[in-house]
Amino acid sequence: MSIDFSVVWQQLPQILSAFWNTIWIWIVATILAVLLGFVVAGLRRYGPLWLNLLLRLYVEVIRGTPFLIQLFLLYFGGPFIGLSLEPIPAGLLGMTVYGSAYFSEIFRAGFAAIPPGHVEAAECVGLSRGQIVRRILVPEMTMLVLPQLVNMAIILMKETAILSIITVPELTLVVGAIGSQQYAFVEAMTMLALFYWALVEISDWLGRLAEKKLSKFRFAV
């Protein structure tokens, strides 16, 4: 028995289409998760106690359960409560909710790490809470948590493989199906691993580049 990658490469157009699906689903879900996570962190920091407790429960439940189970409940259990979604919207929603819980904790830690004196100085010059968040907290917090944000984005990228269980036509589903059809499981899984490895390396490089470019704005504690 020999390894022959040609049987997989013959399906390259189909693989590239799935690769594109993986990329755009990951990017859209990550952006939405970052935005939702930021809102959750902000409300937990500045909202009333009851809201903080409610959002804390949300974060703990999402972080305390596997993404696979969450996706199953959303896609297969959603119709029981009137939430019937197609595979791609269900995947996007599931990844957004899952990622937002982790991003919110990253942002919350970033807010807490900002020296109190910076906020006090902004209050002394008459800046409103909104201006303090926009001009002080967000820029400084971004520099502090950028490596963690990139790392979480990479984790979300790899989690796109789980979307195959609800038939989202992403890389894992398509390449796995090709491997089954062509009886080329080793070749298909090897190619799949290489695709994800390349995405991780590119994402890591872009993250380090962004951190280097923004390092000149780092504040002094």
Image (cartoon, rainbow, N blue to C red):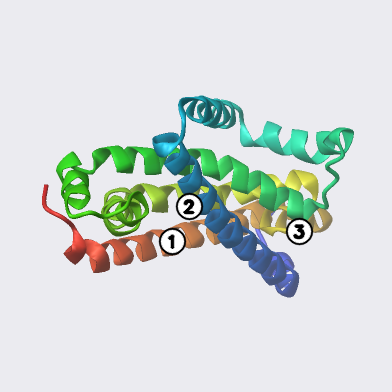
Contact, mark 2 vs mark 3 (Cβ under 8 Å): no
Q: In the rendered structure, find residue 211 and report the number of the disc placed on it.
A: none
Amino acid on which the number 2 mark rests in the picture = Ala
Q: Residue at x 50, y 61 (%)?
A: 199
Q: Secondary structure at mark 1?
A: helix
Crowd tier of the residue under label 3, counting other residues whose Cα lies within 10 Å: few below 14, some 14–19, many 20 or above: many
Q: Separation of disc 2 and disc 3 at Cα?
A: 20 Å
Q: Secondary structure at mark 2?
A: helix
Compare residues 189 and 120 and report the one nearer the observer. Answer: 120
Residue situated in front as seen by the camera: 84 or 198? 84
Q: Which residue is mark 3?
A: 169
What residue do we see at 32% from left, 48% from top? 145
In this view, the mark in front (2 or 3): 2
Front of the two marks 2 and 1? 2
Residue contact at pointers 2 and 1, CB within 8 angstroms: yes
Counting from the top left corner in percent of width and height, residue 79 is at: 87, 38
Q: Residue at x 59, y 58 (%)?
A: 26
Mark 3 element type: loop
User: Which is nearer the N-term, disc 2 or disc 3?
Assistant: 2
Task: Identify the residue under disc 2.
Answer: 153
| Vertical relation: 9 (above or below) 118 | below
Decide: few, some or many residues near mark 2? Use Cα within 10 Å; few <14, some 14-19, many ≥20. many
Q: Which residue is mark 1?
A: 203
* Type of the residue with mark 3: Pro
The answer to whether residue 126 is left or right of residue 55 is left
